[in-house]
Amino acid sequence: DENNGLELQAGYYSLRQIKAATRNFHATNKLGEGGFGPVHKGVLSDGTLIAVKQLSSKSSQGNREFVNEIGMISALQHPNLVKLFGCCIEGNQLLLVYEYMENNSLANALFSSESDRLNLDWQTRRKICLDIAQGLSYLHEESTLKIVHRDIKATNVLLDKDLNAKISDFGLARLSGDDESHISTRIAGTIGYMAPEYALRGYLTDKADVYSFGVVMLEIISGMSNATCIVEDDSVYLLEWAYVLQKQGNLLELVDKSLGTNCSEEEALQMLNLALDCTNPSPSLRPTMSAVVSILDCQNSKQV
Ligand code: ACK
């Protein structure tokens, strides 16, 4: 039934297949630590590259998030969401199998040490913003399930070989339901990316994702991580600094210096102001993700 959004579209893998693909979770195939546990790279017998997420801690919370992720992502299909190929539940192993994203996370591309960092030009950065916005707009408005991701941040955006951006990590995603809002009893997300009304009062709507998206946009434009942004010996969140610069009329100071003349000041200002609109303290004054898509789409097509 096509309208049954919860139908499992993903496949099933045996532990034997996964062990063969990852050379028994060999250390050299380890991509990193995810929210649940380690993530390994693998190659299936037909040559398809995969990323395997393993649930290591056996906490009930971890289990819940893991099962939540399977349920959510298997019902979702969009070019800007990381594709779940399938899962493996065998013995005490819980594994999720994803398409492999050659260029790892956006955080890695922007903030890692010199050798690992990618040189992303302005056009690519703008396209990455548009990709994330399209993925979120789908989650909020177009998917059969209306979903709030709740943990949008640069580490949860992955880049494929052509630098297309896709949203990953649906462990904390929630159905936004029919009513406008929902008061959460357990606040989960990442400090520095969480919308104030959600962090302080548990008030959760899709506008919480819009806020996190605004923070990620600032990171993309500045090449600085929100969590570790250091300004003049003080540790200040990138977002706070952006508001100070906006007041002083110096917002352009935020633009990554390595971009040089690669972007026009007018366009950079438009993007920076859009990012700050997304982080408006009042959720109702933030744009919807589909409005953000229209604005970015328009800029993107002017250039190409
Ligand atoms: O920034 P990274 O190198 O990219 O480190 C994290 C790590 O695993 C823990 O999440 C990487 N990762 C996660 N999912 C994938 C995937 N589908 N393809 C490639 N790398 C992935 C992520």
Image (cartoon, helix red, strand yellow):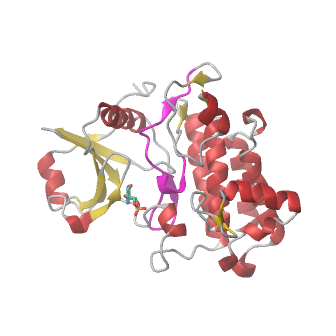
Instruction: Give, as a single range, the part of the protein colored magenta.
Output: 152-177
The answer to whether residue 199 is left or right of residue 244 is left
**Total numbered labels:** 0
The answer to whether residue 288 is left or right of residue 11 is right
Figure quadrant of residue 298? bottom right
Q: Nearer the viewer, residue 219 or 247?
A: 247
Ligand 1 appears in which quadrant?
Answer: bottom left
Q: Residue 171, relative to residue 254: is it above or below?
A: above
Q: Residue visible at 30% across and 34% down?
A: 63
Q: Nearer the viewer, residue 250 or 167?
A: 250
Spot occupied by residue 246 in the image (x, y as percentages of width and height): 83, 58
Q: Which quadrant, please, contains the C terminus?
A: bottom right
Q: Residue visible at 42% across and 63% down?
A: 104
- As for residue 165 lying within the magenta part, the answer is yes
Q: Residue 15, relative to residue 201: is it above or below?
A: below
Spot occupied by residue 196 in the image (x, y as percentages of width and height): 66, 38
Q: Residue visible at 32% across and 40% down?
A: 10
The answer to whether residue 210 is left or right of residue 36 is right
The answer to whether residue 81 is left or right of residue 63 is right
Figure quadrant of residue 245? bottom right
Q: Which quadrant, please, contains the N terminus?
A: top left
Residue 193 in sight: yes
Spot occupied by residue 16 in the image (x, y as percentages of width and height): 11, 50
- As for residue 1 lying within the magenta part, the answer is no
Residue 267 in sight: no
Q: Nearer the viewer, residue 39 or 301?
A: 39
List the single residue furthest toward the top: 179
Q: Residue visible at 64% across and 40% down?
A: 195
